Image (cartoon, rainbow, N blue to C red):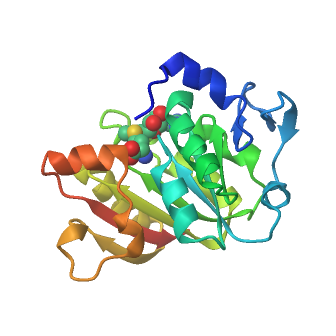
Amino acid sequence: MSKKGKQEKFVEIGTLPNVFQNHEVLTNNLVNSEGKKVNMQGHWHDFFGNDNPITVELACGKGEYAVGLARMYPERNFIGMDLKGNRLWRGATAAIQEGLTNVAFIRSQIDFISYYFAPGELSEIWITFADPQLEKPRKRLTSNFFMDWYRKVLKPGGLIHLKTDSPELYDFTMKRVIEEKLKLQFAHDNIYTLPEQMPEWTIKTYYEQMHLEKGLTIKYLRFEL
Ligand SMILES: C[S@@+](CC[C@H](N)C(=O)[O-])C[C@H]1O[C@@H](n2cnc3c(N)ncnc32)[C@H](O)[C@@H]1O
C-alpha cells in the first residue's frame, strides 16, 4: 500500500509518461508528462507503436481492468479513463513498474471521449462498477447520451462490456440493448455462480472487492454497438 497522499499522487501523475490529462474542456487538447498540449485523436497507435486493437476502461478508478487486461493481452492496447487523478496514479504507477507499454490513462470527464479518439479508433469499451446514478438516468454510462459518443469512437460492431453490482444499471442497460435492437452477446446477473468463467472476470476492482465482501452479486453483459 502506498504511503503517498492524495495531493502528492495528483502532482506526480502529471509526470508519468503513460498519463494524459484534460486541462481544457471542449477541445482535443490533452497535456502529456512534459506539460505539452497534445492532440491524441487518431494518434494512439503511434503512441503505442503498433496497430493493435485499443480497449478503453471507463470510470477506471485505480485502473485494475486497464492494467489487468494489459497483462493478460500483450497483443492489445488499453487506456483507462477517470476524473480522479489520485486513483489513476495507482494503475499508471503499477504499469510503469511492471514495464507494461500497452497501457495508458486519460484523466478527464468521460463525457469528452469523442475529443480524444478518432471515429473507429476503439475496438472495445469496458465499464467497470460505474455509479448507477439512481436519481439521474441520463448520467448513467450506458444512457443514450453516452452511447451516442461511444458510437462515434468505436469501430462498427465494437464491443461494450459492463460489469456491475447494480441491478438498476444492469436492467437499464439490458433495456437499452433491447430497445436499440443491439446484438447482445452475453448477459448474466450472478456471474460467479456460472460453471464456466471468462478469464477477464478474475480481475477484481477495488469497488468489486468491497461489493463482494458485502455479499452482493456481480452482473456482466456484453453487446455490440
Ligand atoms: C464506483 S467508482 C469505480 C471505480 C473502479 N472502476 C472500480 O471498480 O474500483 C466510479 C468511478 O467513476 C468515475 N467517474 C464517474 N463519473 C465520471 C465521469 N463522468 N467522467 C470520468 N470519471 C467518472 C469516478 O471518479 C470513480 O472513480
Left or right: 191 as drawn, with respect to 28: left
Q: Nearer the viewer, residue 172 or 194?
A: 194
Is residue 189 depicted above or below 89 in this figure? below
> On the rendered image, what quadrant is the C terminus found in?
bottom right
User: Could you say where residue 89 lies in the image, as x and y percent from the top left?
Assistant: 56, 35
Looking at the image, the residue that sits furthest to the left is 215
Instruction: Name which residue lies at 50% across and 47% down.
Output: 63
Instruction: Name which residue lies at 74% across and 46% down.
Output: 116
Left or right: 209 as drawn, with respect to 158: left
Instruction: Name which residue lies at 64% across and 44% down.
Output: 105
User: Could you say where residue 43 lies in the image, as x and y percent from the top left?
Assistant: 84, 54
Left or right: 197 as drawn, with respect to 116: left
In the picture, residue 121 is in which quadrant?
Answer: bottom right
User: Could you say where residue 223 lies in the image, as x and y percent from the top left?
Assistant: 46, 71
Q: Do we see residue 178 in this rendering? A: no
In the picture, residue 179 is in which quadrant?
Answer: bottom left
In the picture, residue 185 is in which quadrant?
Answer: bottom left
User: Could you say where residue 6 lies in the image, as x and y percent from the top left?
Assistant: 49, 20
Is residue 215 depicted above or below 162 in this figure? above
Q: Do we see residue 18 in this rendering? A: yes
Instruction: Name which residue lies at 27% across and 48% down.
Output: 209
